[in-house]
Image: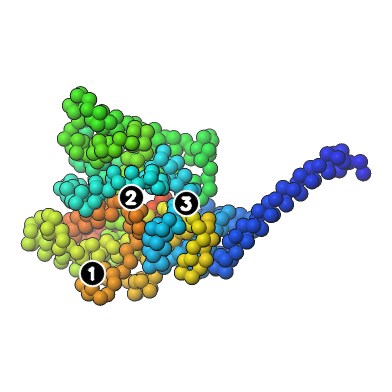
């Protein structure tokens, strides 16, 4: 008996005591956590692992690029308020008005803030960025960018956006007749060229020179964006920041993506800072378009931006301004193809505008209200930015009669919310008119796909302008049908944003003669 498991008895007894102590501390902390979140135990919850909770199915969903789908499935199976556990509880909401009210109230009174983990994940893209900040650090950034993305600020760029849309139409007319045309890549190029023109002063026309730095290479830049955004999702659900230093393919891809953006952006950022400092030689190097770019304006008016902080911020703007609108356009094209009445009404609306004005101006744009309804209805059904951020309770609060302890995370299934019958009657129906009621006594449906409260999407006006102009040009020049039918709208994946796997291929029929 002098030994315990092959060790001297005293040593074995010491290890046994230490082990029991560790288990005891772990058990005590687990019991305290269970008591702290006791009120949430009454909520419905998916089956979970006894130790890891819901981490395994969530990681599997992210690996399969189906995070949005598992959240939607849980919302449908377990109701508009349910909870899942990832080391801490996450209360998931899927009622549109409840989500809107919760975000607005919580961010207004400070009871809800962005979670530390999601902030760290955002800031891990390439450095601190606006969406990863709170308080004063967020406020000065947002204050600097707000005027640029305001309705009046964006309206100045109508000509540039229209030029980009016209390039897409020219490419479509040049496509081989009777051949399927995947529209999603064309929309990605459209939105990337627009955001690069606005933020960096890169000409819309790829044949025009951009003397301030390397040309915009669509495919490598898009691939680099995909690597960074996919890493955000992994870090947001538990991957450690230090894993980027491991000799893995994911880590190699991450560093390659960083190098791509540093090479693409460094000279432009340096030139913007030189213009801010009044260096005489800088003005001669800068084209008129670059001098009017958001980068130059932001650098000039906000001295707290440096090379190190501008680089990740510009990448944030490029990412936010590309996939969101591109995939929304793809889904709008798909829904119009499957809903002939909506298609005919949209096309007739566009024809009337061109008959009256011959072109789209800020004035005639107001007559395209039905297209705005198409876009909003598309966002309701396909909230492409589903699952990009979450909030955390800073103190005990009550949400729809449920006691939410401090520390609880709140998240939402935007696809579930978009199919909430209380907010959207006949939710499975594609019905743009639901957004166009003139009856002031009937409240408008909640539009939460651009977010709510002070953190509402900075690029909302740009997204609506791009989508409206592009749809108008498409409807003016073409009719179309889907190559793969409804499966184009059902076979979806998620990198950071939701996208159609088949890239939305269509058969185009030119309208000849084009309505003038």
Indicate the secondary structure of the residue bearing disc 2: helix
For disc 3, the marked residue is: 115
Q: Give neighbour class at mark 3: few <14, some 14-19, many 20+ (Cα, 10 Å).
A: many
Instruction: Tell me the mark number nearer the camera, choosing from 1 and 3.
Output: 3
For disc 2, the marked residue is: 323
Q: Give neighbour class at mark 2: few <14, some 14-19, many 20+ (Cα, 10 Å).
A: many
Q: Give neighbour class at mark 1: few <14, some 14-19, many 20+ (Cα, 10 Å).
A: few
Residue 356 in the image: x percent, y percent? Answer: 7, 62
For disc 1, the marked residue is: 436
Mark 1 vs mark 3, CA separation in Å: 36 Å
Q: Earlier in the sequence, mark 3 or mark 2?
A: 3
- 350 left or right of 220? left
Residue drawn at the location 32% of the way across and 63% of the way down: 447
Indicate the secondary structure of the residue bearing disc 1: loop
Q: Earlier in the sequence, mark 1 or mark 3?
A: 3
- Nearer to the camera, 363 or 299: 299
Indicate the secondary structure of the residue bearing disc 3: loop
Residue drawn at the location 34% of the way across and 62% of the way down: 448
């Amino acid at each position: 008996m002098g030994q315990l498991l092959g060790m001297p008895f005293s040593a074995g007894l010491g290890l046994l005591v230490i082990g029991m102590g560790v288990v005891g501390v772990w058990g005590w902390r687990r019991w305290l956590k269970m008591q702290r979140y006791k009120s949430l135990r009454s909520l419905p919850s998916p089956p979970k692992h006894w130790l890891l909770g819901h981490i395994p199915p969530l990681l599997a969903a992210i690996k399969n690029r189906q995070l949005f789908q598992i959240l939607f499935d849980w919302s449908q199976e377990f109701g508009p308020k349910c909870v899942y556990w990832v080391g801490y509880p996450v209360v998931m909401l899927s009622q549109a008005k409840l989500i809107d009210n919760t975000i607005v109230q919580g961010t207004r009174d400070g009871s809800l803030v962005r979670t530390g983990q999601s902030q760290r994940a955002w800031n891990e893209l390439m450095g601190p960025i606006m969406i990863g900040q709170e308080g004063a650090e967020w406020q000065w950034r947002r204050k600097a960018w707000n005027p640029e993305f305001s309705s009046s600020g964006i309206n100045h760029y109508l000509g540039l956006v229209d030029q980009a849309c016209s390039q897409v139409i020219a490419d479509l007319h040049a496509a081989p007749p009777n051949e399927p045309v995947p529209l999603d890549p064309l929309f990605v190029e459209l939105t990337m060229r627009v955001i690069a023109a606005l933020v960096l002063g890169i000409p819309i026309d790829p044949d025009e020179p951009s003397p301030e730095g390397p040309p915009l290479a669509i495919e490598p830049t898009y691939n680099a964006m995909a690597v960074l955004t996919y890493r955000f999702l992994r870090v947001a659900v538990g991957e450690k920041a230090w894993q980027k230093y491991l000799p893995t393919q994911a880590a190699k891809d991450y560093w390659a993506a960083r190098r791509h953006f540093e090479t693409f952006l460094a000279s432009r950022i340096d030139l913007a800072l030189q213009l801010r400092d009044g260096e005489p030689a800088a003005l001669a190097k800068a084209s008129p378009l670059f001098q009017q770019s958001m980068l130059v304006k932001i650098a000039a008016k906000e001295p707290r931006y440096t090379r190190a902080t501008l680089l990740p911020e510009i990448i944030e703007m490029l990412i936010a301004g590309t996939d969101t609108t591109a995939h929304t356009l793809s889904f709008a094209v798909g829904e119009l193809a499957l809903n002939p009445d909506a298609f005919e009404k949209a096309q007739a609306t566009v024809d009337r505008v061109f008959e009256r004005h011959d072109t789209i101006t800020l004035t005639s744009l107001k007559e395209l209200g039905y297209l705005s309804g198409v876009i909003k209805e598309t966002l309701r059904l396909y909230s492409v930015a589903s699952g990009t951020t979450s909030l955390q309770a800073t103190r005990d609060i009550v949400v729809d009669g449920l006691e939410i302890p401090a520390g609880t995370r709140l998240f939402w299934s935007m696809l579930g919310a978009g199919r909430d019958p209380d907010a959207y009657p006949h939710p499975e129906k594609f019905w743009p008119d639901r957004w166009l009621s003139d009856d002031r006594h009937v409240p408008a449906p909640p539009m939460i796909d651009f977010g709510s409260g002070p953190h509402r999407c900075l690029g909302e006006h740009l997204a609506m302008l791009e989508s409206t102009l592009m749809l108008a040009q498409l409807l003016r020049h073409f009719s179309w049908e889907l190559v793969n039918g409804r499966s184009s709208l059902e076979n979806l994946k998620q990198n950071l944003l939701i996208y159609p796997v088949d890239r939305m291929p269509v058969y185009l029929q030119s309208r000849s003669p084009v309505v003038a």
